[in-house]
Amino acid sequence: MSELRALLFDVDGTLADTERDGHRVAFNRAFKEAGLDWDWTVPLYGELLAVTGGKERIQHYLDLHRQDFSMNGDLTQYIADLHAAKTRFYTEMLGQGSIPLRPGIERLFREAREQGLKLAIATTTTVENVETLINHTLGSEALSWFDVIGAGDVVPHKKPAPDIYFYVMEQLGLAANQCLAFEDSENGIKATHGSKLTTVITINDYTRDHDFNGAALVLDQLGEPDAPFQVLQGDVGKHTYFNMELAKTIHHHFQ
Ligand code: XBP
Ligand code: MG
């Protein structure tokens, strides 16, 4: 029986509700700045989220909705430039402090650290976006709370491929049975299951109808002592919010 040594967190949708009012808006600003009439509405963006990674998502949109799009030059570079502009708009938005962490995230980070566990990030978004989110929600000293930030193009295949989780565990020097992962989406749980990690899901509006078969727990949020979670799947015993005691129980049970 292995001891729980680390908590691994997805970012978008899990640490914060970043997609609808963050990434989506930033993509649209980048399109406008480039003189494009592309408009990613809330429902369209929900469909486009099927593909992770901003550059990959733009390519997916072109394939599905803009087959007539043509340009001079290198399309890969064009998309990379659009995406860089999107990252600029997105980090500006984060800098305005408009996107808070989800309930229970900061509390769980602190509790895990007090108990000597490692914290790590496994995300498809860029490291720039992760660092800016952490800076503007927890303060710059909180970056040192994370032993590994696995992000973006550091692995060749983004989620649902398990690569980013394998990368993070390798960097931590830990095996899957020593870790617990936190995700919000079907692509996320495919990645954690591909790397044999036990997974806790906190849903959001874009992911509530996803297939979370095999998740250890599916919750609406991690909750707080004065703001209980709703349990959508799994057994939480007497707990009304997610804390380290529940993390250890879940980890023990699913080994
Ligand atoms: C998040 C994503 C990301 C963001 C955009 O997936 O799919 O692509 O939407 O980020 P996950 P970038 O939460 O499963 O990691 O534009 O920086 O790629
Ligand atoms: Mg996510």
Image (cartoon, rainbow, N blue to C red):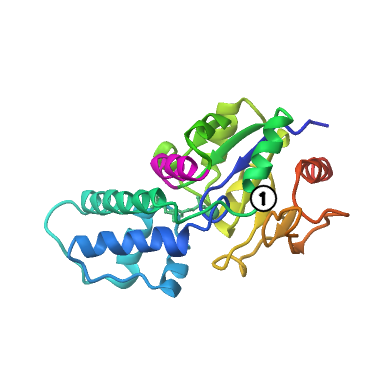
Expressed as whole percent of the image width and height from the top left, the position of residue 156 reads: 42, 41
> Taking 218 as reference, is 180 above or below it?
above
User: Magenta segment: does it hold 128?
Assistant: yes
Q: Mark 1 points at which residue?
A: 104
Expressed as whole percent of the image width and height from the top left, the position of residue 51 reads: 44, 59
Secondary element under disc 1, as helix, strand or loop, is: loop
Q: Is residue 84 or residue 88 the one in the foreground?
A: 88
Q: In this view, does 124 lie to the left or right of 69?
A: right
Image: magenta residue range: 125-137
Q: Is mark 1 within 8 Å of ligand 2?
A: no
Residue 211 shown in magenta: no
Q: Position of residue 80 (x, y in %)?
A: 27, 49
Above/below status of 112 relative to 97? above
Residue 223 place in picture, x, y as percent: 71, 55
Q: Residue at x 51, y 45 (%)?
A: 137
- The amino acid at mark 1 is Gly
Look at 79% across and 58% down and name the residue there: 234
Q: Is 236 in front, or is 78?
A: 236
